[in-house]
Image: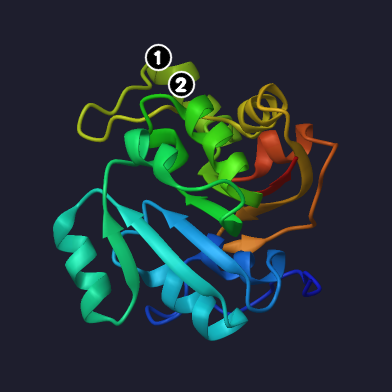
Amino acid sequence: MAQLELVHSAPRASAEPRADHAVIPHLIDEGARVLDVGCGDGALMAFLARESNARCSGLELDPALVRTCAARGLAAVQGDADRDLKQFPSEAFDVVIFSHALQHFADPRAALKEAARIGARVIVTTQNAAHWAARFKLAFSGRTARWDHLRHAASVRDIAALARDCGLAIETAVPLSGGRAGAPFARVLWRANWFAEEAVFLLTP
């Protein structure tokens, strides 16, 4: 597995990968079989194929985005992951990835359990709903809902608890703030729960 290094780079240009995407190649093996759940336009799959020689497949609800993946030469199928993850055989992939996708499931716990059945490892990236700025906003506005973008808000601690409920361990996790990666963690959650804007979790059975 590649060595994870702290990222201290210049401000990202538009052509550079999203911050959570940039971390993921350090968490997977060369040539890994990857399922990207909620793959969108295939940006992560293309990046992993280039950086890690990963053999990527995608599952995406929006048929227009599936066509975009196909136009880019990427393997993606159209389907509702809430229902269709059950159709994949056990241990079909080395890694299953939810890149800002798990919180959009009707039942994130069931989806994570299915991912753990399908893949040897699971990567979850999420916005941290408990970041200090979000706490400050809630304290003064008293509002959390975003009706135009419904999802399950989750903190670093929430993802850790969900992983435990599903029988998964945190092998490592990486906090992200300002588009930069911080020091990886696995057990000490409080600092990331307060100060990370996002986090990338590598989960194992």
What residue is rendered at 22% in x and 26% in y? 147
Q: Is residue 114 visible?
A: yes
Q: Along the line of sight, which residue is nearer the eye, 7 or 75? A: 75
**157 lies left or right of 62:** right
Disc 1 on helix, strand or loop? loop
Q: Is residue 11 visible?
A: no
Q: How many marks?
A: 2
For the C terminus, the quadrant is top right
**103 lies left or right of 202:** left
Q: Quadrant of residue 40?
A: bottom left
Badges 2 and 1: C-beta atoms under 8 Å apart?
Answer: yes
What residue is rendered at 48% in x and 34% in y? 111
Q: Quadrant of residue 157?
A: top right
x and y percent of residue 20 in the render?
A: 55, 60
Mark 1: few, some, or many residues within 10 Å (few <14, many ≥20)? few
What residue is rendered at 28% in x and 59% in y? 77
Marking on residue 89:
none
For the N terminus, the quadrant is bottom right
Residue extending furthest left?
A: 64
x and y percent of residue 184 in the render?
A: 79, 54
x and y percent of residue 123 in the render?
A: 61, 51
The three-letter code of the residue at mark 1 reads: Gly
**157 lies left or right of 143:** right
Mark 2: few, some, or many residues within 10 Å (few <14, many ≥20)? few
Q: Which residue is mark 2?
A: 138
| Mark-to-mark CA distance, 2 and 1 | 5 Å
x and y percent of residue 16 in the render?
A: 46, 79
Residue 130 to residue 143: above or below = below
Marking on residue 142:
1
Disc 2 on helix, strand or loop? helix
